[in-house]
Image (spheres, rainbow, N blue to C red):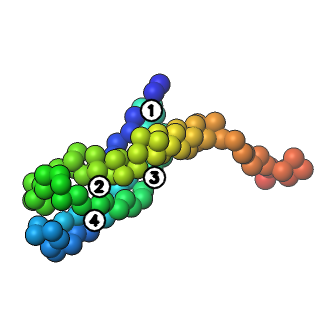
Amino acid sequence: MTNTYTWTVNWMNCYPTAESQTDVVFQVSWTCLGSNGATPPVTASITNVANIIYNPNEPFIPYAQLTQDVVIGWVQEDMTPTGVAATEAALDTGIANQVNPPVVSPPLPWATAAT
């Protein structure tokens, strides 16, 4: 089964004014949740902060009109495709390690079960 990824925005910090605009986003906390889709699902998540650089040459979107998809687009642009792929690969590893743990701690061989 292929893993799926859900990107969400946790919070955003804004400059009150910048380049004659109001509430200009400059920092975004995001989480990416990976899931293997099993029942119950095995999941892993990564949370981080992206610094967003306002470009006055691009159309400005007022804060109240921002959507999560737009902001996640900014985050992923800041990360570059390589960073997005690395994040999702790390989630794949986290999920795989839960399904097939690379390290286990079996009981000590000389320990006897209490009766």
2 left or right of 112?
left
Label 1: which residue?
Answer: 3
Residue 95 appears in the rendering: no
Which is in the foreground here, disc 4 or disc 1?
4
Q: How much space separates mark 4 and mark 1, taking CA atoms?
A: 31 Å
The CA distance from mark 4 to mark 3 is 20 Å
Q: Do callouts 1 and 3 mark residues in contact (Cβ within 8 Å)?
A: no
Residue visible at 72% across and 45% down in the picture: 103
Pointer 3: what residue? 46
Residue 1: image location, x then y, percent = 47, 25
Rounded to the nearest angstrom, the CA distance separating label 2 from label 3 is 12 Å
Q: Nearer the viewer, residue 4 or 74?
A: 74
Task: Identify the mark nearer the N-term, 4 or 2.
Answer: 2
Distance Cα–Cα, label 4 vs label 2: 13 Å
Closer to the camera, 2 or 101? Answer: 2
| Label 3 packing within 10 angstroms: few (<14), some (14-19), many (20+) | some
Residue placed under numbered mark 2 in the picture: 9
